[in-house]
Image (cartoon, rainbow, N blue to C red):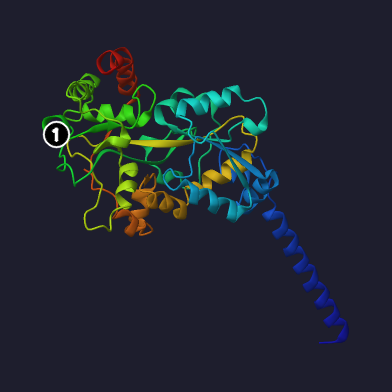
Amino acid sequence: MTSRAAVAAAALLATAVAGCSSTTSKDTKQPPVNPRAASLAQGFGTMDRLVEAARKEGSLNLVGIPRDWVNYGAIMDRFTGEYGVRINVLEPGASSQREIDLAKAARVPDKMPDVFDLGVDVAVANAQRFSPYKVTAWQDIPDAVKDLKGQWYAGYGGYMSIGYDPRKVAAPARFADLAARPGYAVALAGDPLQTAAAFYGVMAASLQGGRPKAERGLALFAELKKAGRLSLPSQANALVDWDYVNAAKAAQTAGDDKPAWKVVVPADAALASYYVQAISDKAPHPAAARLWEEFLYSDEVQNLFLKGFARPARMEALEMSGRLDKQAAAKLPPVPRSPVLLTIPQTDEGKTYLKANWARSIG
């Protein structure tokens, strides 16, 4: 090849390479970030861009999440450590309804929640306050525990259970045993008119053939009250509460020769419920809120919920793919395969009945 030909060939090659580079750059150019979009693809395109947008916001406001609840302390520390986004928890002990009330009353960004952690009934009643967002793992969340438009979706849950001290009482097989057998000092996890765990405890005790009827649950606890066996949680040898609460308590004494706490989910009353996630439509840190949701539904964090004895929303999908933490799953109490999930009408009916009758019967 002559010198002139070589120069021409080199110039042609350079032009071709430049043309390819220009095309590649154009093809990979991303649209502007939309931090309030309904999915990662629509708003950010890539996780890197979502992370960048969240870091620019710098903060995330959560509400109603204690650090000792289903391993949330470890989860929050992991999020801040990985992404450098500071977490502010507004009123950690707030109930689901209190979370909504705080959001309604907030007038400055520092007091406005970005994300809610709610009972299903409260989420359904306030869906208009949420910004739809479908996490990347959306298909792994069962349809029965998510709003199909993406306004709210289950994060973790569990079964209503009976925790008991095996040194003092026999293992109860069903809720009726608490009144029928001697020796039980029974407690609910609060007031069923105020606390979700206590309400679901009464409803679990009311199940018969998979159907709830609040009158039956109230009758059981009224009988315990009359017999002087309805106690405070700190004094009870049997506690009706979520299995992740009772299982965490049992784990503290699991290595002892005589464990002080065990937990059972009655086979005839397997009442399940989930806490759901929702992003506020007025979130002051919308990108950080969406990064938090993507983080919560990652394999790692779903397994962190499991280590906190809660059952992650993606549990079945993780098990099928072989990514479930089997060691953590083995520590959960066994449960029937077909749990009962209260419908919204059943929940409303139960709450209405207890509101009218609980104080009169229990005091």
Residue labelled with disc 1: 177
Q: Quadrant of the C terminus?
A: top left
> Horizontal placement of 231 versus 137: left or right?
left
> Horizontal placement of 233 versus 170: left or right?
right
Q: Position of residue 172 (x, y in %)?
A: 16, 39
Q: Position of residue 122 (x, y in %)?
A: 44, 26
Image quadrant in which you'd find residue 9: bottom right
Image quadrant in which you'd find residue 229: top left
Q: Residue at x 32, y 59 (%)?
A: 327
Image quadrant in which you'd find residue 4: bottom right
> Horizontal placement of 251 versus 178: left or right?
right
Within 10 Å of the Cα at label 1, are there few (<14), some (14-19), or many (20+) other Cα atoms? some
Q: Residue at x 67, y 48 (%)?
A: 55
> Horizontal placement of 47 versus 217: left or right?
right
Q: Quadrant of the N terminus?
A: bottom right
The residue lying toward the viewer, choosing from 241 and 146, is 241
